[in-house]
Amino acid sequence: MAEDATLALQTGIYTQLSAGGSGLSGITLYDNVPADAAMPYIRICSVVQSQNWRTTTTKGQNVYAQFDVWSDSTAGSTECKTWLNLLSVALTATAVTATGWSVIDQLVGRTDTVDLSTPEGHLYHGILEMQYHLQEV
């Protein structure tokens, strides 16, 4: 492999999601979440795993990237699930660009919503896992 695909992919994902028309206006995207971040927000690529693959003529990587939606809404998990849905649509509507790589396939692997609320306050964690199949160009 000439280089790891994960940085190129993460850069392309951030560009895609922060572009106008992604459907994600009204929520902040973070790579590194500041301590005073207001909710709701999305953390991109909080967990990234990659696995190299090759054939006799090509090289590539399968990349699994986790996105986290955090909400403290009093409306229950609805806000979290709404942002997960919008994020899923934004990530799959068009192919992401990853410099040096061709994105062969991208799909939603799984989604989860976890209620972490306590008597002191509401807290919801939405998890979306994307699967990317990339080929080196």
Image (cartoon, helix red, strand yellow):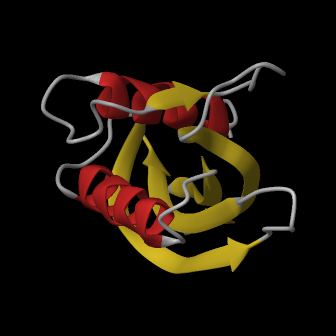
Residue occupying the point 36% across, 51% down: 103
Query: What residue appears at the point 42 percent right and 30 percent down from the top-left corner?
Result: 12
Residue furthest front in the image: 119
The residue at 59%/37% (across/down) is 39
Q: Which residue is drawn at 59% across and 40% down?
A: 44
Quarter of the image with the C terminus is top left
Q: Nearer the viewer, residue 90 or 54?
A: 90
Give whichever of 22, 26 is nearer the camera: 26
Is residue 89 in view from this perspective? yes
Q: Quadrant of the N terminus?
A: top right
Image coords of residue 69 (percent x, y): 58, 52
Q: Quadrant of residue 111?
A: bottom right
Q: Position of residue 52 (x, y in %)?
A: 70, 59
Q: How many labels does the image show?
A: 0
Residue 48, percent from left and from top: 73, 51
Vertical order, 70 against 131 (above or below): above
Q: In this view, does 110 lie to the left or right of 16?
A: right
Q: Nearer the viewer, residue 132 or 75?
A: 75
Viewed as shown, does residue 72 lie left or right of 93? right
Q: In this view, does 27 lie to the left or right of 16?
A: right
Q: Which residue is nearer to you in this view: 73 or 13?
A: 73
Whole-percent x and y of residue 10? 55, 34
**On the image, which quarter does residue 74 sit in?**
bottom right
Is residue 57 visible in this depiction of the protein? Answer: no
